[in-house]
Image (cartoon, helix red, strand yellow):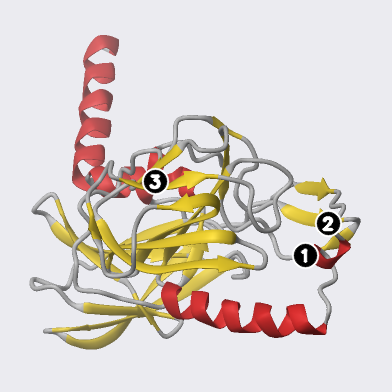
Amino acid sequence: MIKRFIICCLLFVSSVCHAQGFITRLLNKPVQGGVAVVALEREQAKPSVYYQGNPVLVLHEEGQRWIAVVGIPLTVKAGTQSLTVEGASGKYSVNFEVGHKAYREQRITLKNNRQVNPNKSDQTRITKELNEQIAGYKQFSDRIPSNVLFDLPVQGRLSSPFGLRRFFNNQERNPHSGLDLAVPKGTPVKAPADGEIILVGDYFFNGKTVFIDHGQGLISMFCHLSAIDVKVGQQVKRGEVVAKVGATGRATGPHLHWNVSLNNARVDPAIFIGKFQP
């Protein structure tokens, strides 16, 4: 009897996991700085979905249903959030829940105080560069991402995780918006998925930087690079070398800083490589 009960439980869990689908199991981490996968059960054809005024990635999961894959900003309060759906059945809202996540602190000492307290000339440059990058993060193409289980752009130790509250010379600044991978200078950086190069630059804080649009608001950003091997408009394949690791910009040593942005929200890249820590 007990054996039959265990088998039934296993079958039930298996059927639930299958019903959820691979994308939901991989990506659904609905916390601050995470990703929510929201089922759009009412829609037979692909709808348009918006969150906080930004278009959202919509995918068809394993031939079963349409899902919205939503990036959740670190600044969102835990609780109920709402999507706007525009489909064949009309315009309506779908709610989802966001959980709280506590992120630890990181304190960094920089010898160059201008990288903590920029002067007036630096601020003018920083504002211009920030606007360029914001425009890059806001891009939304029709491309369907080639894969959402990303390859690591470099093989190395995961050093500074996403979401750290950062203090430079004991002054609090923006939280860590990406994932740092500790690898030597010159290590080739590979595209984690197919995409188009939409921005390259050499910025005050980021140093040499590359943006890859993987499709529908899913964007990778790599910075602190020593060299860039691609140009804007170039199509790249998963695994193709796009740059080399360096320590340019505000960096204390060679490493790769990797951002993942989804509907203009910076989210934890660890989610996309199966390394998310609750």
Residue 98 in sight from this viewpoint: no
Q: Residue at x 28, y 49 (%)?
A: 193
Classify residue 78 by image quadrant. bottom right
Determine whether 168 is above or below 141 in the image. Answer: above
In percent of width and height, residue 2 lies at 29, 12
Q: Which mark is in front, 3 or 2?
A: 2
Question: What is the distance, in whole Å, between disc 2 and disc 1 at their CAs?
Answer: 7 Å
Q: Earlier in the sequence, mark 3 or mark 2?
A: 2
Mark 1: few/some/many CA within 10 Å (<14, 14-19, 20+): few
In this view of the protein, which residue sits in the foreground, 242 or 169? 242
Marking on residue 79: none
Determine whether 90 is above or below 20 in the image. Answer: below
The residue under label 2 is 168
Q: Secondary structure at mark 1?
A: loop
Name the side, left or right, on which 252 lies relative to 11: right
In percent of width and height, residue 59 lies at 20, 62
Q: Which mark is in front, 1 or 3?
A: 1
Q: Secondary structure at mark 3?
A: helix
Name the side, left or right, on which 157 lies relative to 237: right
Question: In the rendered structure, which amino acid carries the disc numbered 2?
Answer: Phe
Q: Residue at x 51, y 74 (%)?
A: 133
Classify residue 16 by image quadrant. top left
Name the side, left or right, on which 164 lies relative to 259: right
Question: In the rendered structure, which amino acid carries the disc numbered 3?
Answer: Phe
The residue under label 1 is 173
Q: Are marks 1 and 3 in contact (CB under 8 Å)?
A: no
In percent of width and height, residue 169 lies at 89, 55
In this view of the protein, which residue sits in the foreground, 157 or 86? 157
The residue under label 3 is 272
